[in-house]
């Protein structure tokens, strides 16, 4: 199955896909600092798309995602690879990262369009108008 675009999911739809498909994997593409200190969805695997100190695209991103997918989730020839769901702060980096996965031949790619924290509200605050955390979905922080 080949898709031309990364499929967008709401945070709740992503959580439902993870619940109903045990092969699905949630990958948080935010920076190390965001993942650790802002928090992340419970069970998310961290593979940064852009990270400190240089804030450039991770040249190993696709390879690291492929490593996450090893170990059984792509072993059944007729089943295809496990669904990959990407999440970032507000849905922009996850879309870019998903496009890179599609270009590399990983076909079942989704992204959480509202992200973990959602868009900025009228007071320049996040987590108040949308996002994984705003929807009350399971998350944790270090």
Image (cartoon, rainbow, N blue to C red):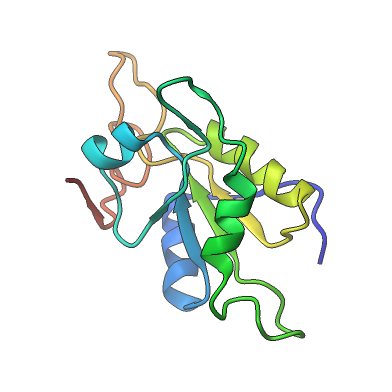
Residue located 51% across and 36% down the image: 91
Which of these two is toward me, 124 or 32?
32
Q: Nearer the viewer, residue 53 or 93?
A: 53
Q: Is residue 41 above or below residue 39?
A: below
Relative placement, left or right, of 95 versus 28 is: right
Q: In terms of image quadrants, where is residue 97?
A: top right
Viewport quadrant of the C terminus: top left
- Locate residue 125 relative to residue 113 in the image: left or right: left
* Viewer-side residue, 134 vs 24: 24
Q: Residue furthest left?
A: 142
Tell me what residue is drawn at x 64 percent, y 49 percent. Answer: 62
96 left or right of 94 in image? right
In the image, residue 137 lies at what x, y percent?
Answer: 29, 55
Whether 72 is drawn above or below 44: the answer is below
**Residue 7: x and y, percent?**
66, 51
Give the residue at x 49% y 64%.
25
Q: Is residue 121 left or right of residue 51?
A: left
Q: Residue at x 57, y 67 (%)?
A: 69
x and y percent of residue 104 in the render?
76, 51
Q: Position of residue 105 (x, y in %)?
A: 78, 57
């Amino acid at each position: 199955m080949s898709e031309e675009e990364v499929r967008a999911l709401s945070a709740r739809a992503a959580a439902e896909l993870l619940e109903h498909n045990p092969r699905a994997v949630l990958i948080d593409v935010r920076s190390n600092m965001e993942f650790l200190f802002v928090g992340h969805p419970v069970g998310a695997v961290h593979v940064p798309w852009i990270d400190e100190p240089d804030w450039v695209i991770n040249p190993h991103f696709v390879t690291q995602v492929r490593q996450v997918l090893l170990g059984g989730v792509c072993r059944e020839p007729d089943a295809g690879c496990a669904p990959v769901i990407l999440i970032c702060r507000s849905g922009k980096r996850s879309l870019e990262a998903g496009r890179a996965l599609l270009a590399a031949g990983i076909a079942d790619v989704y992204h959480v369009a509202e992200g973990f924290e959602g868009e900025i509200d009228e007071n320049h605050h996040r987590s108040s108008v949308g996002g994984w955390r705003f929807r009350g979905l399971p998350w944790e922080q270090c």
